[in-house]
Amino acid sequence: MVILGAGPAGLVLANLLHIRGIDCVVLERADSDHVRTRARAGFLAANTVRILDRHGLSDGLHRDGRTHGTCEFRTGDGRFRLDYSGLGDGEQHTVYPQQNLVTDLLTCFLAAGGRIRFGTEAVAVLDADGATPSVSVRAADGRPGRWRARYVAGCDGRHGAARRSLPAGAVRRYHRDHQVTWLGLLAEAPPSLDAVGYAVHERGFAGHMARTPEVTRYYLQCERDTPADSWSEERIWDELDVRMRAEEYGPLRRGRIVQRGVVDLESDVLEPLRFGALFLAGDAASLISPSAAKGANLAVLEAELLAQGLIDDLVHGDPTGLDGYSARCLPRIWGAQEFSHWMIGLLHGAPGPEHESPFLNCLQRSRMTALRTSRSQQDWFAERYVGV
């Protein structure tokens, strides 16, 4: 088994296969230090924690993660809080930076004797629909190589070799550009509130998400094609103060901006998630906007489902799970996409034609009012916000 990519999907899959004695290798373009330190999402759903618990991969998150169950909305009509851990199914998130989870998964895999090849770029998946599938690779020094396997798992993202190797017409792609762009920021600053903060402002959305007691992630809606380094730190903090209404609700705790990047909110789904011996998981299978923190959670779910199918096939000679992999994953993917799309509409002003904006902005305000006042709407939100 060849696994492309050492993110959450690839490493969960590798650990689960290795535990069952299935020979596999992970091919990763980046070096070990980069994989262990690249900052991504940090909110793990309750079901994700259960999956990691089932397979003995959760020691780090239980030791260093923090449970979280509250979000706060700030708008021109005031602010309100939802203690979502007491609504819906009564579940909460665990805040645990993705780079910490990846480090845990790498440590477990390598300690058990697993094989990973850092600095190895997958160039193409060859003959995925034939009898002898393989992956052509390029080492860090430029030397070419090839790995042969019975199956290949594409966990290498939307721009990886797995997607690029799909022949025209093999899958159907569903794509949406939400016409919203965020400036994503990581600050060496303690959280400014004990909740996830969503601020809706006429100047654009702002978000506050705690990562650790010393580090906080912020988001600022910005114009499309804004360079990540075009805003000074002073401008960033001043704009966050305005949009999060710091003068009204209390100052933000400032600190050095240590990471920044521009994110265009897009959604992307491929159907089916299989072409012959090639299976897709994580961002290679579906890209989801970060508005509802579903990406890493979908990746872990898909990795477990794919591992179950592979184990059944390779150990027990039963291909049923692999044949049904897409059918089992896609309803969960589309459910997450639907909620993410709803959240985008809740948090952002209308990006459409000027004559449509007043109508759509009034609908946005109505959604926020329902979330503030309706218990049934709050229960629905809690179930979808934590569920995956």
Image: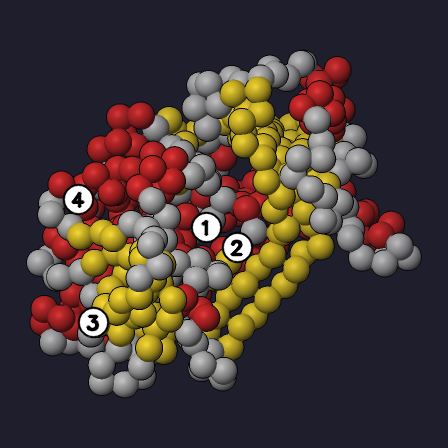
Which callout, 4 or 1, points to the residue nearer the camera?
Answer: 4
Side of 206 relative to 383 (left or right): right
245 and 155: which is toward the camera? 155
| Residue 378 rendering spot, x and y as whole percentages | 56, 41
Q: Report, in whole angstroms, how far the alpha carbon at label 3 lies from the one at label 2.
A: 30 Å
Q: Are marks 2 and 1 in contact (CB under 8 Å)?
A: yes
Q: Give neighbour class at mark 4: few <14, some 14-19, many 20+ (Cα, 10 Å).
A: few
Side of 199 relative to 319 (left or right): right
Residue at (35, 59) in percent of width and height: 142
Q: Are marks 3 and 2 in contact (CB under 8 Å)?
A: no
Quick check: 60 above or below 15?
Answer: above
Q: Amino acid at mark 3?
A: Ala
Give the labeled residue for mark 4.
110
Q: Are marks 1 and 3 in contact (CB under 8 Å)?
A: no
- For label 2, the SS is loop
176 and 197: which is toward the camera? 176
* Mark toward the start of the polypeptide (4 vs 2): 4
Q: Give neighbour class at mark 1: few <14, some 14-19, many 20+ (Cα, 10 Å).
A: many
* Mark toward the start of the polypeptide (3 vs 4): 4
| Residue 120 rendering spot, x and y as whole percentages | 31, 56
* Mark toward the start of the polypeptide (4 vs 1): 4
Give me the disc on residue 288.
2
Q: Amino acid at mark 1?
A: Gly
- For label 4, the SS is helix
151 and 271: which is toward the camera? 151
Give the labeled residue for mark 3.
149
Q: Amino acid at mark 4?
A: Leu
Q: Report, in whole angstroms, how far the alpha carbon at label 1 lies from the one at label 3.
A: 27 Å
Give the labeled residue for mark 1.
295
Please indicate, yes or no, whether residue 350 appears anywhere in the rendered image: yes
